[in-house]
Image (tube, rainbow, N blue to C red):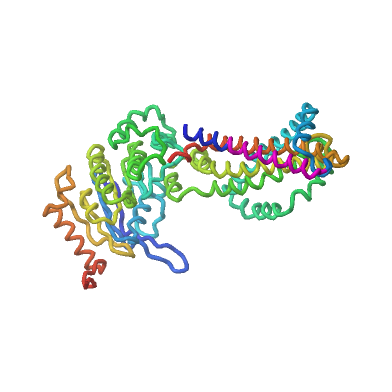
């Protein structure tokens, strides 16, 4: 079954000057794959993700999540935001349990899977801490735990590492891959980092600048688990070079201005 | 440990400066031979207070009670009004402007009306304390309830919880710091309201003591009541401050 199926999807923000955010986007995302949505800032890639999450209404075309037409947030999805969106007054453990509480399920029954997630993300010793006591990377890991606690079939990540420094970001990429290799659910990962998108994904959908269109969908055929060093390999370089060419073709990267 | 020693230190410093002030006051009154009816010396104020302590405490207790009842009402009703304002759209466009304009009327000016409506018992004092205190709660609670970050709103929608769940687990606890800072303002205002109520019509309370003692030019008695009032104000304010630290301890971790 396909996890997400978008056909001729359009998104227009109505207003005095209507803005076309997504123009004829068609994409099939198979279940159990890690898909990166890559594009420059403001290309509508986050809008696409928010449409899948049911947070934005589509203007035209069709959008199905696991066979059902999207009308409001679909069941059984997890979402990670750019900023962690943790609740400051709850401990890390109680933050992670929030989806369980909202779903009116037993937090006791979910305790073992929380312990497993905390261990998997290296937060085992921080469950009783408050978000303010944690670093940015640790907070985002907690937000990932929260998104995973109710075993979502579909995990949506909206530039989750965008606010982190480069080193922490590398670390989080490695950890996310490790977590995903354990869980193997469907992940849609929005980013503007070329190398990040290739490193993590089975498939990279490259978006053009506004109005957002899909330029190309690239299958990434690199063995897992991938180490950070893979980024220096020729195969990896071929993928990133190909994507960079696409962006150059759109006039996004222009080296001719570099005279000094 | 460091926090406790810090609190202790500021307490000691406060007591020392208060003591120095009393000494200077005493010396000035004695030195310039000021008449007690104009400005009594602290020693005679304390003598006055000590001589009639049970009577003073009974009246202070009365003022404390009306203040607290008015304060608690202002918190409960103020938060309820704020909740209605943020969750019922037409309520905000119709009622909020009314509340704002009503707030600009000096509440002291309408105090006599309450005596007409509610008599000369404790009710008008409670009503005035409530009315003066409630606006601070409404304004701060509305601000707090509205300040849920956009991504937390999105999270709530994706999690598909009930409205009650979102309100009690996200919106209300998120507004708690604002509500508590509103409470810190409103506790002081409630005390003002209770005294105003006693000025207008009462046979009891510290406000009544001040008014009746002033009528018989018994200035030491006025000051004795003022001292008690100041102590009460500090006690009430620091109690709410303590409550704030307790309930929002997560804000004070770095």
Q: Quadrant of residue B75?
A: top right
Quarter of the figure with the N terminus of chain A: top left
Residue A77 visible within the image:
no
For the stretch drawn in magenta, the main secondary structure is helix
Residue B182 placement (x, y as % from top left): 60, 44
Q: Which residue is most to the left?
A: A234
**From what the image shows, is residue A115 above or below residue A86?**
above
Numbered range of the magenta stretch: B11-34
Residue under the point 39% across and 57% down: A58
Residue under the point 82% across and 46% down: B112
Q: Is residue A101 left or right of residue B247?
A: left
Q: Which residue is most to the front?
A: B31
Quarter of the figure with the C terminus of chain A: bottom left
Residue B3 placement (x, y as % from top left): 49, 35
Q: Nearer the viewer, residue B208 or B83?
A: B208
Residue A192 placement (x, y as % from top left): 28, 57
Q: Quadrant of residue A120?
A: top left
Q: Is residue A76 magenta?
A: no
Q: Is residue B20 magenta?
A: yes
Q: Quadrant of residue A96?
A: top left
Residue B151 placement (x, y as % from top left): 42, 49
**From what the image shows, is residue A233 above or below residue B23?**
below
Q: Nearer the viewer, residue B231 or A50?
A: B231
Q: Is residue B118 left or right of residue B148?
A: right
Q: Nearer the viewer, residue B230 or B43?
A: B43
Residue under the point 44% across and 37% down: A90
Residue B33 visible within the image:
yes
């Amino acid at each position: 079954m396909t996890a997400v199926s978008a056909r001729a999807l359009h998104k227009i923000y109505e207003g005095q000057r209507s803005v076309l955010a997504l123009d004829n986007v068609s994409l099939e995302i198979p279940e159990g794959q890690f898909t990166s949505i890559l594009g420059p800032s403001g290309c509508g890639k986050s809008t696409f993700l928010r449409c899948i999450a049911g947070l934005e209404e589509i203007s035209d075309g069709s959008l199905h999540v696991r066979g059902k037409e999207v009308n409001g947030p679909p069941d059984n999805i997890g979402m990670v935001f750019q900023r962690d969106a943790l609740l400051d007054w709850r401990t890390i453990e109680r933050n992670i349990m929030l989806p369980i509480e909202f779903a009116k399920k037993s937090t006791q029954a979910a305790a073992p899977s929380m312990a497993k997630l905390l261990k998997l993300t290296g937060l085992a010793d921080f469950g009783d801490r408050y978000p303010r006591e944690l670093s940015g990377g640790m907070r985002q890991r907690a937000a990932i735990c929260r998104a995973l606690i109710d075993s979502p079939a579909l995990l949506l990540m909206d530039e989750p590492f965008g606010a982190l420094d480069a080193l922490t970001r590398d670390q989080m990429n490695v950890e996310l891959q490790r977590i995903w290799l354990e869980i193997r659910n469907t992940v849609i990962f929005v980013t503007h980092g070329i190398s990040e998108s290739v490193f993590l994904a089975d498939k990279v959908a490259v978006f053009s600048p506004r109005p957002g269109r899909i330029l190309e969908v690239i299958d990434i055929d690199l063995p897992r688990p991938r180490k950070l060093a893979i980024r220096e390999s020729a195969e990896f370089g071929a993928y990133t070079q190909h994507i960079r060419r696409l962006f150059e073709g759109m006039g996004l990267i222009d080296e001719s201005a570099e005279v000094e | 440990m460091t926090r406790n020693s810090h609190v202790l230190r500021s307490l000691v410093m406060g007591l020392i400066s208060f003591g120095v002030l009393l000494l200077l006051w005493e010396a000035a009154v004695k030195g310039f031979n000021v008449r007690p009816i104009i400005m009594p010396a602290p020693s005679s104020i304390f003598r006055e207070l000590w001589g009639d302590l049970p009577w003073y405490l009974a009246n202070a207790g009365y003022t404390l009670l009306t203040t607290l009842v008015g304060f608690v009402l202002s918190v409960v009703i103020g938060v309820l009004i704020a909740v209605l304002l943020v969750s019922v759209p037409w309520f905000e466009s119709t009622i909020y402007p009314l509340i704002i304009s009503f707030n600009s009327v000096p509440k002291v000016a309408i105090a006599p009306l309450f005596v007409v409506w509610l008599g000369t018992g404790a009710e008008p004092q409670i009503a005035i304390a409530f009315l003066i205190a409630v606006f601070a709660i409404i304004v701060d609670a509305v601000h707090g309830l509205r300040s849920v970050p956009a991504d937390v709103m999105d999270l709530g929608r994706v999690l598909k919880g009930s409205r009650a769940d979102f309100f009690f687990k996200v919106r209300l606890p998120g507004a708690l710091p604002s509500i508590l800072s509103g409470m810190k303002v409103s506790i002081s205002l409630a005390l003002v309201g209770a005294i105003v109520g006693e000025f207008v019509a009462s046979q009891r309370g510290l406000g009544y003591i001040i008014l009746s003692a002033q009528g018989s030019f018994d200035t030491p008695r006025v000051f004795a009541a003022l001292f008690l009032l100041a102590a009460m104000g500090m006690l009430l304010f620091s109690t709410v401050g303590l409550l704030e630290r307790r309930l929002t301890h997560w804000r004070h971790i770095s």
